[in-house]
Amino acid sequence: MKSKSLVSIDDLNTDEILGILDLAEEFEKKPVQNLLEGKIIATLFFEPSTRTRLSFESAISRLGGKIVGFADSSSSSVSKGETLHDTIRMVSNYSDLIVMRHPIEGSARFASEISSVPVINAGDGANQHPTQTLLDLYSIRKTQGTLDNLNIFMVGDLKYGRTVHSLMMAMSRWNTTFNFISPEELRMPDEFKLYLENLGLKYYEHTDFTDIISKADIIYMTRVQKERFSDPIEYEKVKNIYVLRNSMLSNTKPNMRILHPLPRVNEINPDVDSNPKAYYFEQALNGVFTRQAILCKFLNIK
Ligand code: CP
């Protein structure tokens, strides 16, 4: 039987998601364990990354596994013209699991169909980023004590931001109220809004959120994805459209938390960092424990 891959967050059912979050809690208590001894994990990053690659590699190292791969495809035979098909066929011979980031939407699904070992999507273009979503869910549950009935504000680039696409799909399982805040040019794509409509879930679209900020349980800020714009002038128009400042947070719920997948550019002013409601750096740390759980799940390690 072909091994299971994680390409979309919908590749996991709700019990599997909750199982990964529970396992991540165990890794947070005891992050160093020799569970991946003898396993080789390939990390293939065709796009830049700091958190996803390094937290995966930290997770693998803390569990005693070995890493092969590249952080820059120009150092691989892709630069000589080797196709993604052939690259994945080769690397699946050399490893027990592949973690891949690629700029083309659908590339992770394509890789999973070729690979003889599980493929974990570490971001495919503007499509999905399911391991980010699992660490986001972990962070939301940890800070709110529940995933149920929350009011989540997604702010910024909802068109190209793959993290909000995956998170929206995941949170739709827990009766979430969604507030989508973006400029007209960067609205949540219709396919994702249709996804919510088919489930009978509510979402609201806004271009500003200062008047409604008191309703938020989670404010999920996002970077405008410069690398996805074909016209630099269009990017310049929207790049600084939302800047969250500490002065805006006085009228927010005591338990509200600010998340951001990072990297940030200007969308969260550094004066927010010392506010106890800022949670983005802890969120990034949670990525290590969550990715330890993901590796064990997809390598079938009990
Ligand atoms: N959140 C995230 O994907 O960050 P990196 O691009 O640094 O991996």
Image (cartoon, rainbow, N blue to C red):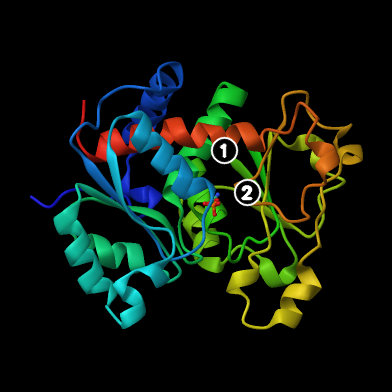
Q: Is mark 2 on a helix, strand or loop?
A: loop
Q: Name the residue under label 2.
A: 262
User: Which residue appears farthest toward the left when viewing the image?
Assistant: 1
Which quarter of the picture shows residue 156?
A: bottom right
Amino acid carrying label 2: it is Leu
- Residue 278, placed above or below residue 25: below
Disc 2 residue: CB within 8 Å of ligand 1: yes
Residue in the picture at 67% in, 57% down:
223
Q: Position of residue 38 (x, y in %)?
A: 18, 35
Amino acid carrying label 1: it is Ala
Question: What's the distance in space between the residues labelled 2 and 1, CA to CA?
Answer: 8 Å
- Residue 36, placed above or below residue 86: above
Residue in the picture at 27% in, 41% down:
66
Does the residue at mark 2 contact the one at mark 1 (Cβ under 8 Å)? yes
Which is more toward the observer, 58 or 213?
A: 58
Q: What element carries label 1?
A: helix
Q: Is residue 282 visible?
A: yes
User: Which residue appears farthest toward the front when viewing the image?
Assistant: 75
Disc 1 residue: CB within 8 Å of ligand 1: yes
Q: Position of residue 260 (x, y in %)?
A: 65, 45
Q: Where is residue 68 in the image (x, y as percent from the top left)?
A: 29, 51
Residue in the picture at 65% in, 69% down:
226
Which quarter of the picture shows residue 34?
A: top left
Q: Mark 1 points at which residue?
A: 284
**N-term mark: 2 or 1:** 2
- Residue 141, placed above or below residue 129: above
Q: Can residue 114 be seen in this view?
A: no
Q: Position of residue 217 (x, y in %)?
A: 69, 33
Which is more toward the observer, 73 or 126?
A: 73
Residue in the picture at 21% in, 72% down:
86
